[in-house]
Amino acid sequence: MIPSLTHYLVLSAVLFAIGTMGVFLRRNLITILLSIEIMLNAANLAFVAFGRAWGRVDGQVIVFFVITVAAAEAAVGLALVIALFRHRESLNPDAYTSLRG
Amino acid sequence: MPGDAILFYVFGAVMVVASLLVIGQRSTIYSVLLLIASFAALAGLYVLLDAPFLAVIQIIIYAGAIMVLFLFVVMLLNAPHEQAPADVERHWQGHGPRRLGAVLGLALLVELVWSVWRTSALQEAQVGAASARQLRALGSVREIGHVLFTDYGFAFEVTSVLILVAMVGAVVLAKREI
């Protein structure tokens, strides 16, 4: 079997690393949120692959919860982005350093 | 099965390339659209993994609802592209941390892939080791609903509270005056 569990997990790991690098490298709040979505989906892929390997639906059920949490996160995160943009007219996270002290 | 292998590599390549372009894109709107393409490929992978219901959910809720919310905010803010000329000075200031971030990200990639590749327990637990009866149950909405409302009933109810809190929180945060 070529698409084995290991194949899916390696793909998931690659996607997770891409998402992490997006958070590190990009200077745009919306793109950072998109990178977090990439990481969440990498985790989802690993969940479904594990569930398939053990023949259980628990992996898929967890993915439902992850999607729900992602929706809540996107709603709150984008509301924060809107509030910040209204405040400073910028999406660059480096513009918001008031808490640095 | 060679058909499955070809589909896996096609969908996987589409996902990786689209995700890389999401990261490499200057324009936020293209990033969001490329992420939708990446999620479509992920739905294809879910079908390969005998989870057709999840594939539909992925398209309808993730690509359809969540990403449209992102698209809506991007268009609403009409933000300037990243690193407009005025930001160049600030960009050079932050160059060291960014390079460190790239190195750390690559290190994470190498670590994850190496650890997954070398774990022998994973090699034994091949996808497809499950019995035919279990696999039939995997794809059925009936089985998913049963587990969701029995074993995960509490988590399901808590999730509804979470959605309510997120809804109220989003309104409070984005409203000008409460």
Image (cartoon, rainbow, N blue to C red):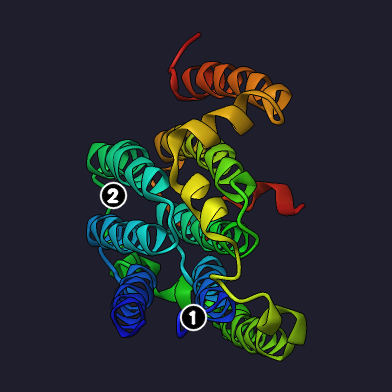
Helix, strand or loop at disc 1? helix
Q: Does B22 sit left or right of A69 as displayed?
A: left
Q: Which residue shows up at 48% across the image and 54% down it?
A: A37
Q: Residue furthest top?
A: B178
Query: In 3D space, how far apart are the residues under numbered discs 2 and 1 (Cα atoms)?
Result: 21 Å
Q: Is residue A72 visible?
A: no
Chain of the residue displaying label 2: B
Above or below — where is A59 with respect to B95? above
**Contact (CB < 8 A) between labels 2 and 1?**
no
> What is the quadrant of residue B124 in the picture?
bottom right
Tag 2: Cα neighbours inside 10 Å, few (<14), some, or many (≥20)? some
On the image, the x and y values in percent for residue B170 come to: 50, 24
Badge 2 marks a residue whose secondary structure is: loop
Q: Residue at x 58, y 28 (%)?
A: B146
Query: Observer-nearest residue: B28 or A65?
Result: A65
Q: What residue lies at 60% left-to-right and 63% top-to-bottom? A: B130
Rendered image: mark on residue B79: 2
Q: Quadrant of the N terminus of chain B?
A: bottom left
Frontmost residue, A91 versus B135: B135
The chain letter under disc 1 is: B
Give amino acid for label 2: Ala
Q: Amino acid at mark 1?
A: Trp
Q: Is residue B146 above or below residue B165?
A: below
The numbered disc on residue B92 is 1
In the picture, measured across the screen, residue B123 lies left or right of residue B36, that is right
